[in-house]
Amino acid sequence: MDTRRKSPRATTLLAALAGIAAAALVLGVAELAAAFFTARATPVIALGSTFIDFTPGWLKDFAIATFGTGDKVALFVGMGLTIIALAAVLGIAAFHRWVLGALGVTAAGLVIVASVLSRAGASTYDALPSLIGTAAGLLALRLMIARLPAARAVPSDSAPSDSAPAAAAARALPGGSSRRSFFAAAGVTSVAAAAAAAGGRALAGARNSVEAARRGLRLPAPASPAPALPAGLEAPVDGITPWLTSNPDFYRIDTALSVPQLDVDTWELRVHGMVEEEFTLTFDELLEEDLIERHITLTCVSNPVGGNLVGNAKWLGYPLRELLRRARPLRGADMVLSTSSDGFSASTPLPVLQDGRDAMLAVAMNNEPLPLEHGYPVRMVVPGLYGYVSATKWVVDLEVTRFADRTSYWTDRGWSEKGPIKTMARVEVPRSFGKVAAGTVSIGGTAWSQTRGITRVEVSVDDGRWEEVTLAAEASVDTWRQWSHEITVGAGSHTVRARATDPADGLQTDERADPVPNGASGWQSVQFTAT
Ligand SMILES: Nc1nc2c(c(=O)[nH]1)N[C@H]1C(S)=C(S)[C@@H](COP(=O)(O)O)O[C@H]1N2
Ligand SMILES: [Mo]
């Protein structure tokens, strides 16, 4: 008789333990991944909220009555016990039939994913941490179960059977040592779970402390404040995009899986390359310079015609032309390669940074220190260029060089070396496939042509004659400009097209182009229905 058959009870207990250790790993790894990817809903919190949603009212009342303000603790204890019980059952199931256990763990993982996705503000991307955690848990469970004696007793002298690999693994080991190796695997799993959970908390804590430092930051007043805004910047049309984009509404584009957490006390900008004077700039030194404040509209090269990867904010920063004046570029240099702490880079034509436009190292956005995801503590903002060749967030390095010598993140991936923003008119009202009341309809939108300005916008309804619309006031040539118009339409389906004119390049091209390699072009056409 095989020794392993002597204690089936003990083995079942170990299987339950394996299930519990695997569950701990699922949650630990998921928390770590959530902190790393800056997920909006973290798995444990989301599970807790779902747990509350599914707790019957009488039990909730009982919990509040009994535990008072300790009801949250009671919730997590109750949830923990539920998870432990479920995990133990799944461990035993996996021990008897691996497929059954694996399906159970996968189902549990999907429950976590579902609770994460059901939280307000969650995006599908937030499912990733739970999926990674579940995968890690499955793998660990598999390794632990494989180290347990076979579920079905197999005489050690029998021929290898068709039973689960677990049985084969167990048989391959001399009596006793399989249990030792089980404890080793379970130990590693538990330690990994605890380490992942602790790592996740540490990461989240570091993020909180950077956010706290950001909130406590006092920025100097600008030496050159933003010019006063003229009245009438917003076109009088319901549903038009606000002229100033708030920080939470500002589009975000970057390659950073995890938002960089930079410390203003250690942040430095290295300025080097083809310059007479190389230097580094600390954050305090940067703030001591004369700062300018300007409204500038940023645009992403990936913005499709009519798209919303564009936003307008007030930026405070140190003019790059001043910084370059200090560095004194050498003859032959034609590009500034800016690099972020996370390795992104952008190549900006040197003349653009010296031609008098308000290109800057920005430290504030709409009267606040830069939000973490918009480049805290310092980013570049260059009027007139798409972000991929100019707007480096979390910037730490400026190298004066030549296009012939160096390339950058997106130019390495087939996008154009130069990225001036194309003139564009956007229709915001009516919405695409929207409904309006037949008769006279107020329509409107935004047009931009940074550094050149917008002098005319025209619309054409149902391919009719082009009509000039009313332009709202212009703050500067570096900002977008709103427009409005009244059209009269009968019931039915209609289209409206829009096109802008700027004083330098003239009429916006009607040539359709995709965003790759240097920005979308073409006249936007919006279909809508009047009833
Ligand atoms: N470090 C870093 N900076 C970056 C990017 C990036 O991927 N990483 N993307 C650029 C691109 S393509 C754009 S359009 C702008 C967007 O800036 P925003 O996210 O503040 O709107 O940032 C630019 N700066
Ligand atoms: Mo972009």
Image: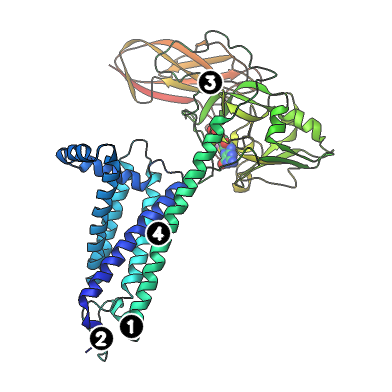
Dot 2 or dot 3: first in sequence order is 2
Between disc 3 and disc 1, the foreground one is 1
- Along the line of sight, which residue is nearer the eye, 418 or 166? 166
Look at mark 3 in the image and give the residue it sits on.
Answer: 447
Residue shown at the point (59%, 34%) measured from the top left: 387
Look at mark 2 in the image and give the residue it sits on.
Answer: 3
Look at mark 1 in the image and give the residue it sits on.
Answer: 176
Question: Mark 1 packing: few (<14 Cα in 10 Å), some, or many (20+)?
Answer: few
Left of 89 or right of it: where is 515? Answer: right
CA gap, disc 1 to disc 2?
9 Å
Which amino acid is tagged 4? Ala
Image position, residue 296 (x, y; %): 60, 23
Between disc 2 and disc 3, the foreground one is 2
The quadrant holding residue 29 is bottom left
Q: Is 296 located above or below residue 73 in the figure?
A: above
Left of 383 or right of it: where is 45? Answer: left
Provide the secondary structure element on which disc 4 rests: helix
Which amino acid is tagged 2? Thr
Left of 7 or right of it: where is 294? Answer: right
CA gap, disc 2 to disc 3?
81 Å
